[in-house]
Image (tube, rainbow, N blue to C red):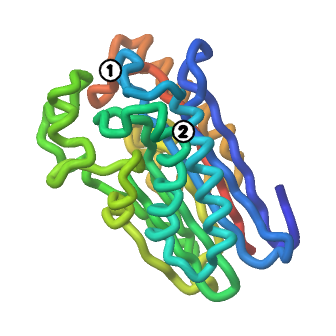
Amino acid sequence: MQTGGMRIELATAPGSPERPNEDWASGTLPASGQGGVLVLLDGVTPPRGDDGCVHTVPWFTARLGGALVELSHSRPDVPLAAILAAAISRTAEAHRATCDLSHVRTPQATVALARWDERAIEYLVLSDSVLLLESSDGAVRAVLDDRLTRLPPGSLASNEIADATVRNKEGGFFTAAADPAVASRAVTGSVPATDVRALAALTDGAARWTEMFGEGDWADTLGLLRKAGPQDLIDRVRELEEADAAAGRVRLGRGKTHDDATALLVELV
């Protein structure tokens, strides 16, 4: 999508054709054309499908993502952490009567969120999705919530007991699930709008190009998104994953060959 001097481009791909894509993303502009909102979510796949919920993870990410878009536009003076808290509460109420929201694996997602107008660009990141900010001089800053990378080896596991000790717990890591209080754990900030010429958001499946395979730094990632587009980035990740698997490697302890991958680029000027 392109309007005026702004360009928004998005691509997403499931990790497997046998499973639904649990990522969710949107780049939206108000009717006035002033400002916009970027939302990117990476739904967390529960082990064995056990999450105490009668709904699917894509149902959850669509509900939460839609609430984030609507609230970010309709409440421009409310900080993004409060927007996330309100969206979590709204989504929880939509299935509290039918589902066990106290379950450690109740549907949840990582969050990358940005909102901009002619004055400022606000941002929020919770868990391991990535938000990139490109300054007017071409420097690229990655906004990261690095709690997952700081966990002791072996802290994350597919069994419920190990996972319960670190998921949405003090000293562990936080995701958007059913408790609005986790919004206060997000990495947040703002920069003058004149200091940024482009934004990009990546789920960890797309960020593998940099984080796992080391094909380039974050500036290279944004440059690739601008030159070749989000779909090309995802295609390159898939080629690297296939080559890695064919060579009998599991890079950096990767648990699955492919993950859902989503990339979104917003060029402001």
Q: Which residue is drawn at 33% across and 26% down?
A: 254
Which residue is tagged 1? 250
Residue 60 coordinates in the image, percent (x, y)? 54, 39
Q: Residues within 10 Å of mark 1 (few under 14, many from 20)?
A: some
Q: What residue type is labelled 1?
A: Val
Tell me the number on the disc at residue 159. Answer: none
Residue 211 coordinates in the image, percent (x, y)? 39, 44
- Quadrant of the frame with the C terminus: bottom right
Q: Which of marks 2 and 1 is nearer the N terminus?
A: 2
Q: What residue type is labelled 2?
A: Phe
Q: Which residue is drawn at 55% across and 54% down?
A: 201
Helix, strand or loop status at disc 2: helix
Residue 63 coordinates in the image, percent (x, y)? 60, 45
Q: In which quarter of the image is residue 238?
A: top right
Q: How crowded is mark 2: few (under 14 residues within 10 Å), some or many (20 or more)?
A: many
Q: Is residue 159 above or below residue 211?
A: above
Q: Residue at x 56, y 18 (%)?
A: 19
Which residue is tagged 2? 60
Front-lying residue, 230 or 240: 230
